[in-house]
Amino acid sequence: MAQLDDLPIEVLEQILLLLDPVDVSQFSQTSSRYHALVYGDPEDQHLWRELYLRQPFDDLRQCYTSLGKPLQKIDWKDQLQRIIRARTVLTKVSVCRPEERCTVLQTLIDMVSNVPPVRHTEVIDLSMNHVWATAMLRGSELIEHDQWELSPEERQLRARLHTYFGLTARDFQHQNRTASRAFVYAMRNYKYDNDFGPFIMDGSGRVNWIHVRAIHHVMSMHIVPTTEETQSAEFNLFPMSMPWTQSIIPEGMDLDKEQDWAGVTGRWQCSFCFMDHLYNNFNSNDNDPLHTEILEDPDFVEVFRSIYVDLRVLGTEDDPAHPGRPRINFGGTLDGHAIFVGYVKVTPDDQIRWHFTSGEQGNAIWSSEGVQVGNVRSKFGILGSWTTVLHDRHDPVGPFWLWKVGEVGDSAEEAA
């Protein structure tokens, strides 16, 4: 009677490709021969490549980075092992070891950031990574697990993943919405150390994802209806959630050769919120807990408004630290009148930063700092904060959301 050892290697490999990666790992431990088959030659990754491609993930050879560059030097084994471990943690958060939390979170962020770009906007072409990650996060406690004492890095990674995912059921709870509003509207969270925007308070220009997530929470609650259905939903699909983080790069376009690599030129909707800026008078001390009395008052009013602006590139400036991604200087008009002047550039942590001033009759009144959420040219758009160009301590401050709705010349009605 034939034994398993009698099977040709090629047949064994075909059998392994039918198994879950966890089962393949367990099989490799049954003998030195099988261990060598699975883990033998680190340079020969054909088995791991085929095993990866059998999973419900995007083909890494078709994936681009968040800055719109093709992936290089793919390590199929390492990628698959990291994702499968993340899957285990998503399924049962309690098995996650403290020392691996950052790795698991970074793995998931890499997975939803490195995806194929959308080539044709009129065709629905969802990333398989996004579908898988959304389904797994929907049934997991990972991004809201409250039994861990998180390090600053872990808090940043989790906030970033939460922002990409979108609203959760807990985000509809009144106390959580109040906490986000308290953070976003407190002027003490805006200083020269973070350029009065959602950046780390160390002058580095790196993104503060905890701040971005709070802005996302405040803005998205004006987009998603607060009905019983949406509040009880495990996941809400809307323009500030994971499917909208995918790059839109038309077929044949090479962003390294494009002056407007960020897709600035076109018609944009700028939505912004504001409230009584006297709130800042109650939160002047950096060390005191944020006061929320005004936010919890039954008569509290938060105004949400939108305008449409046409943006165009004015020129570029080389950025030696980011070849192919020069700083883009742009201008914007509202009904033919100049209102925006700003720039787009890549941050030290490889995110896309937007800065612009705006006003009336050529006078700059407002200063805004934002971050492109998701990949370059994604529909998710830019989340950020605005204040006055004076940056006085008791100035008004608030969140904004800037997202592209069409090409220059499209009417506001058509864009909507």
Image: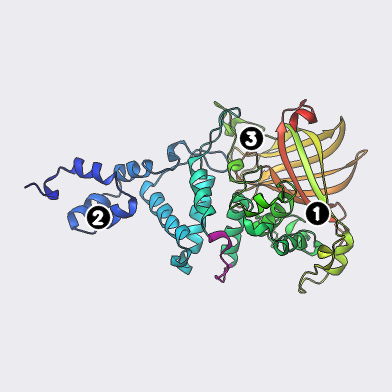
| Label 3 Cα crowd, 10 Å radius (few <14 / some 14-19 / many 20+) | many
Q: Which residue is mark 1?
A: 398
* Left or right, residue 183 beside residue 149: right
Picture quadrant of residue 299: bottom right
Q: Nearer the viewer, residue 250 or 88?
A: 88
The coloring applied to the image is rainbow
* Left or right, residue 66 beside residue 49: right
Find the distance from the CA under tag 2 to the CA under tag 3: 47 Å
Magenta-colored stretch includes residue 391: no
Q: Which mark is residue 348?
A: none
User: Which residue is most to the bottom?
Assistant: 288
Given contact means CB atoms under 8 Å apart, are the residues at marks 1 and 2 in contact? no
Q: Which residues are magenta?
A: 141-151
Q: Which residue is mark 2?
A: 27
Given contact means CB atoms under 8 Å apart, are the residues at marks 2 and 3 in contact? no
Picture quadrant of residue 324: top right
At numbered mark 1, what does the secondary structure look like: helix, strand or loop?
strand
Q: Nearer the viewer, residue 406 or 302?
A: 302
Q: Nearer the viewer, mark 3 or mark 1?
A: 1
Q: Position of residue 167 (x, y in %)?
A: 64, 52
Q: Is residue 281 above or below residue 389?
A: below
At numbered mark 3, what does the secondary structure look like: helix, strand or loop?
loop
| Label 1 Cα crowd, 10 Å radius (few <14 / some 14-19 / many 20+) | many
Q: What quarter of the picture does the C terminus occupy?
A: top right
Find the distance from the CA under tag 1 to the CA under tag 2: 56 Å
Residue kind at label 3, given as amino acid type: Trp
Which residue is found at the position 93% from the left and 38% from the top? 361
Q: Which residue is mark 3?
A: 261
